[in-house]
Image (tube, rainbow, N blue to C red):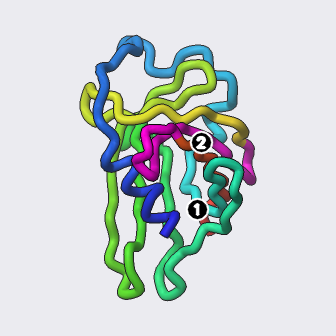
Amino acid sequence: MKKYLIFFIVILLSCSSDDSNTDNPIQNPEFNVDLLIKRWAYNQVNINGQQYIYQHQPSCQKDEFTFANNETQIRQYSELIFINDICSTNGINRDWKVKNDIISLFFGTQKVIDFKVILVNENSFIYSYVYDIDNDNIDDNIIIYAIPYE
């Protein structure tokens, strides 16, 4: 159930205006951006201090997201979530930019969400964001733990 919330949060977030500098999409990163560029699998999620193991569909591949940055995929973010046991998927593609410790995802020129990078190294990517998951008008604190996709 929690993994569906993660996916739908990204999909359903309302757009805000782009207040970042479009001339320089990677500004003063506080982490090594090169370590971000890979395919990641969801591992754990923490919602308001409650830790959960991420439940992948057992008969499907792992739910994943990828940060790419090459000639054919300039600053592309993609996500693939298996939504049922017959391996139907939902996927998204976004552009990404970095400013300090924040990764912003964009749909065209519209900012969709900001992720605060907590840690990124070769074996782990941890980020957080706030969103009202349960629609109680109180922002929930979400921390995502990811590992390299195998």
Looking at the picture, does residue 55 appear above or below residue 13?
below
Q: Position of residue 17 (x, y in %)?
A: 29, 20
Q: Position of residue 9 (x, y in %)?
A: 40, 49
Amino acid under disc 1 = Ala
SS for dot 1: strand
Q: Residue at x 37, y 42 (%)?
A: 73
Q: Which segment did they paint magenta? A: 121-139
Q: Is residue 138 magenta?
A: yes
Q: Is residue 48 magenta?
A: no
Looking at the picture, does residue 33 appear above or below residue 2?
above
Amino acid under disc 2 = Asn
Asked whether the viewer can see residue 72, the reply is: no
- Residue named by callout 2: 141
Q: Residue at x 66, y 64 (%)?
A: 52
Asked whether the viewer can see residue 130, the reply is: yes
- How many C-alpha atoms fall within 10 Å of the one at disc 1: few (<14), some, or many (≥20)? many
Q: Residue at x 49, y 45 (%)?
A: 67
**Relative to 114, is 108 on the left or the right?**
left
Q: Earlier in the sequence, mark 1 or mark 2?
A: 1
Depth check: give the residue in front, 92 or 112.
Answer: 112
- Residue named by callout 1: 41
**Relative to 9, is 46 on the left or the right?**
right
